[in-house]
Image (cartoon, rainbow, N blue to C red):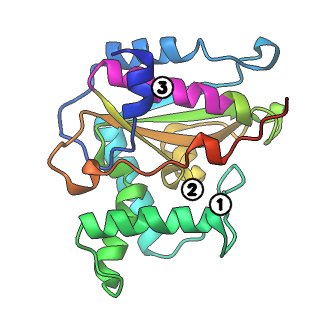
Amino acid sequence: MELIEAMLQRKSIRAFTDKAVPKETVMEILNIACRAPSAMNTQPWEFIVVTGKKLDKLRAVIVEKLKNGAPIAPDHLVVSWPNEGIYKQRQITLAKQLFKAMDIPREDKGKRAWWLERGFRFFDAPAAIIITTDRILGEVGPLLDLGAVMQNICLAALQFGLGTCIEDQGILYPEVFREQMGIPQTKRLMIAIAIGYPDLDFPANQILSERELAENLTTWLE
C-alpha cells in the first residue's frame, strides 16, 4: 500500500475477527514503526504486546473493575475536553455517527454501557500493543515522540491487512498490568493500540470520521 493511500484510508477499527496475528508480523510492524523521529534520537518508546490467554485474563480483570465502579488511576494525564466549542462538537459528531451505525439510542443506558465496555476490552482484538515509557523522562517530554511511533504502527499495520484502534481505555487501570505481568513502577503506561484483522461487517467499522480541511486551519504569511 502506498504511503499516502495508507494515510487517507487509516481509521479506527472497533471490531476484529478472531484470527490470530502472527508474532513475526507484529515484530515487523514494530521495527518499521521504530524508524519514527524522536528528539535527539532518544527513542523513548517501549512496547508490551499482549495476546491469547494473557489478554483474555487482562480483559476480564479490567472489565470487572469497570463494572464495580473502581476509580481509574492512569499513569498519564487523561485527555479532557471543554464542554463546548469546536473540539467538543467534533467529539459529539463522531459519537452520533457511531451510535447511529450501532443502533444505540441516546436513552438506552444498557447499550451505551456495552459500547463503553468494548473499549476497556480492547474491542476484543486478538492482540494489544501497549506503549510505555520510562518515568525518568517525565510525563510530558516524550509525548510528541510517542505520537510519532504510534502513528507509524497504525500505518504499517495496513500493509499487512491489519486494522488498529488507538485507545487509552485499556490502560486506565495500570495496576492491573503490574499485577498480571509484573511491570515495574519505573515504566509509565501511555497508550494502547488494539490490533487485528478487521471485521468488515461490523457497522462501526464502516465509518470514516470527518476531518477539517487544511485550508480552514492554515494561515499563510508571505
In the image, residue 31 sits, relative to residue 46, either above or below, namely: above
Give, as a three-letter code, the residue at label 3. Answer: Ile
Badge 2 crowding class, 10 Å Cα cut-off, few under 14, some 14 to 19, many 20 or more, is many
- Rounded to the nearest angstrom, the CA distance separating label 2 from label 1 is 6 Å
Question: Does the magenta segment cover residue 156?
Answer: yes
Magenta: main secondary structure equals helix
- Rounded to the nearest angstrom, the CA distance separating label 3 from label 2 is 21 Å
Choose the circle earlier in sequence order: 1 or 3.
1
Task: Give the position of the N terminus as an image quadrant.
Answer: top left
Task: Give the position of the C terminus as an image quadrant.
Answer: top right
Which label belongs to residue 30? none
Quick check: 106 left or right of 200?
right
In the image, residue 68 sits, relative to residue 150, either above or below, namely: below
Residue behind mark 3: 153
Name the residue located 38 percent from the left edge and 20 percent from the top edge. 26
| Residue 81 placement (x, y as % from top left) | 67, 65
Give, as a three-letter code, the residue at label 2. Answer: Leu
Which stretch is magenta?
146-161
In the image, residue 99 sits, relative to residue 159, either above or below, namely: below
Q: Secondary structure at mark 2?
A: loop
Residue behind mark 1: 73
Which quadrant of the figure has residue 95? bottom left
Give, as a three-letter code, the residue at label 1. Answer: Ala
Residue behind mark 2: 172
Q: Nearer the viewer, mark 1 or mark 3?
A: 3
